[in-house]
Amino acid sequence: MTTFLGVPGTGNLRGTESFPRAARHALTDTQMRRNVGHATRTIRTKRLAAVSECDDWEQLRLAGSALKQDVMSRLPELLEQLEANVVARGGVVHWARDADEANRIVTDLIRATGSDEVVKVKSMATQEIGLNEHLEREGIAAIETDLAELIVQLGHDKPSHILVPAIHRNRAEIREIFMREMPEAGELTDEPRVLAMAARTHLRRKFLTARVAVSGANFGVADTGTLTVVESEGNGRMCLTLPETLITVMGIEKVVPTFTDLDVFMQLLPRSSTAERMNPYTSMWTGVHEGDGPREFHLVLLDNGRTRVLADEVGRAALHCIRCSACLNVCPVYERTGGHAYGSVYPGPIGAILSPQLTGTHGHDDPNASLPYASSLCGACFDACPVRIDIPSILVHLRAEQVDSERGGLPSGQDLAMKGAAWAMGSAKRFSLAEKALGAGRLVANKDHKITTLPWPGSKWTSARDIPEPPKETFRQWWTRNHQGDAR
Amino acid sequence: MRIALFATCLADAMFPQAAIATVTLLERLGHEVVFPPKQTCCGQMHINTGYLVEATGLVRNHVEVFENAGCDYAVAPSGSCVGSVRHQHAMVARRAGDEGLARRAEAIASRTYELSEFLVDVLDVRDVGAYYPHRVTYHPTCHSLRMLRVGDKPLELLRHVRGMTLVELPSADSCCGFGGTFAIKNSDTSTAMLADKMTNVIESGAEVCSAGDSSCLMHIGGGLGRIRSGVRTVHLAEILAATEPAVVTR
């Protein structure tokens, strides 16, 4: 019997170049670095304050983690329960194996309504499958209604943050985008209120005319069939209530067993994401109701690599993510490179463990194979994660998977260096010989006793940092000289 | 107390002064220090680069060496090497299918301490009798902060050092960008992180930047030296081992 391990995820989950290469370009964008640095520092400080107000924060994190572990251990059963309850309340459930299948399902559903325009609630799942691009090719206009997502869409740009997709833009840039793309708004200043009002006027027209809305979901409750969207602007709620047809695309890992489980997540999520005590607009809907809200409700359950991730005992914790972005905001790598360098719609630490697992990787030239290495393993992400995903350990696990998958082939320079070092350090005798060889480094040191240039790959270090010359006497030589006789 | 020094390969080969200072300090506090000479490397670099298979032999060697040291404790002048022993060794052994080694690694891990936590938690000492007449700022390394949870134990020790002015490091808990092979594989990003760390060190007004890990200090010091900042790096152990020169009477 073969075990079904799922199909690889497709869509916007992989960039065109490796992380180090993409990061090198990104690091030269001084405006982006200022914008992202300022924004992440601000959110970081606020989050710490919001979290420190809760005496039971650690218990909440443990509860969130336990709930997610429970979900992963019985995912098929919970999904079938969710399906049954959505159907019982008048909804229709569709299952999508990958991005293509999900896009096809959504397109057909929109076509059936006769509409060629949809309003959208900000959603990572539809970003992941590239729904907007697909709909555009099919002649259907998708209008993003989240303010930041609208900025990204009007700027013909890509989101660079899970929660704050336009985090890489400042208000002067946003003013330019609005004036160019919304000529009806007239002359604008870069005051946040002026910009928000222009977007509001632009969007209200769309809300009143759109007949179809597409959303994602933060949670799907198995025992009631309730879907939940958590947002800050109220624009999401407009989409969820005004149109006649609502289509929700939800990753299968977003299911929770019972309605009361939301109690834990609705405390963890706002404080971790926007540093708010309570989320401003929490929309929940269960099926359809005569004369109230959409008349048709479709739920598209998206796999797109998730079953694949679930099959990995260590890596599966990446599916616990509730998309709060706290890990992005505390990550020293993300803070410098911004989100685009990660290639996938999921940037930052969570993206570094989620994207390569969703897609799988093909050899070390695969851009996603470089993502698990896009971290100094400083551990700030694990501390900030509201559901305690041990991102550093998963990064190490994925690095090991990567190295192991290449065994048996032609060894790379790194393979040789690592194997050589392991051999040299395999015995104290060889290690002390290696130390003596290292002493030759004194020959290339300058008069300040520093080594300032080395050939590749050492040049990657000496491009910005010196190395002290190796000492005249190693520690073990000193020890032998001073503690001879008592060495064991 | 009989203490086994876990010197770490980096301190042994490149920064012997940190290991020597650890010996000097522990002996001054009245303890017997032994150096099990068969120790080499804990395997952290291999593990964090994904070479867990290659690291298994290093883990086995480490476990055997410290099992046979005949000591109650092993102490290292490094947060990240102790972090690897405590949080990775058993995992590496289990991945290699060696449950026996994993159990032994866990036993060794439970007796292995980073210097500042050993001084405060085990020896219950804050004032180690040090004298260091310099303006110092302290970088709490990521693994000592977030793997070992040493908290402000190093600062408690530093506050008791006579003659020293301890100045605050802005954004102290941000990574310096070292991250082992990260500094090579992602050297541009690593350098960007280092640049901000150096700015903060310089802004602190310190003449010395200290930390509990030779590796992070090699990175920060390598950058500070390159730009001729006038700030030097000194391991925590060296500051704690320093004493007032004997006063010459008559």
Image (tube, rainbow, N blue to C red):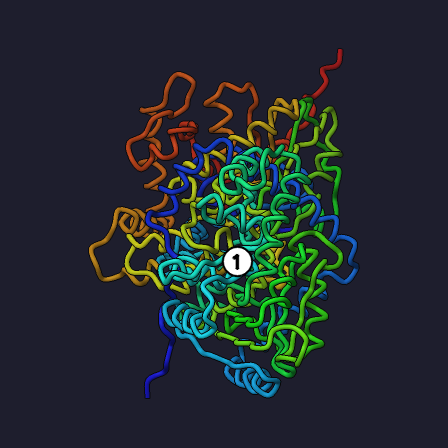
The chain letter for the residue carrying disc 1 is A
Residue neighbourhood size for the residue with mark 1, other residues' Cα within 10 Å, grouped as few (<14), some (14–19), many (≥20): many
Residue at image mark 1: A391
Query: Relative to A282, does residue A205 appear above or below in the rendering?
Result: above
Spot occupied by residue B18 in the image (x, y as percentages of width and height): 54, 36
- Residue nearer the viewer, A296 or B155: A296
Spot occupied by residue A69 in the image (x, y as percentages of width and height): 58, 74
Query: Relative to B98, does residue A32 appear above or below in the rendering?
Result: above
Q: Residue at x 38, y 30 (%)?
A: A462
Q: How many marks?
A: 1
Query: Residue type at mark 1?
Result: Ile
Query: Relative to A152, does residue A304 appear above or below in the rendering?
Result: below
Q: Residue at x 69, y 58 (%)?
A: A270
- Residue nearer the viewer, A343 or B138: A343
Is residue B172 among the parts visible in the rendering?
Answer: yes
Report the side of A310 relative to A390 (left or right).
left
Q: Residue at x 39, y 67 (%)?
A: A99
Dot 1: element: helix
Spot occupied by residue A285 in the image (x, y as percentages of width and height): 65, 74
Report the side of A283 relative to B108 (left or right).
right
- Residue nearer the viewer, B208 or A214: A214
Q: Quadrant of the N terminus of chain A?
A: bottom left
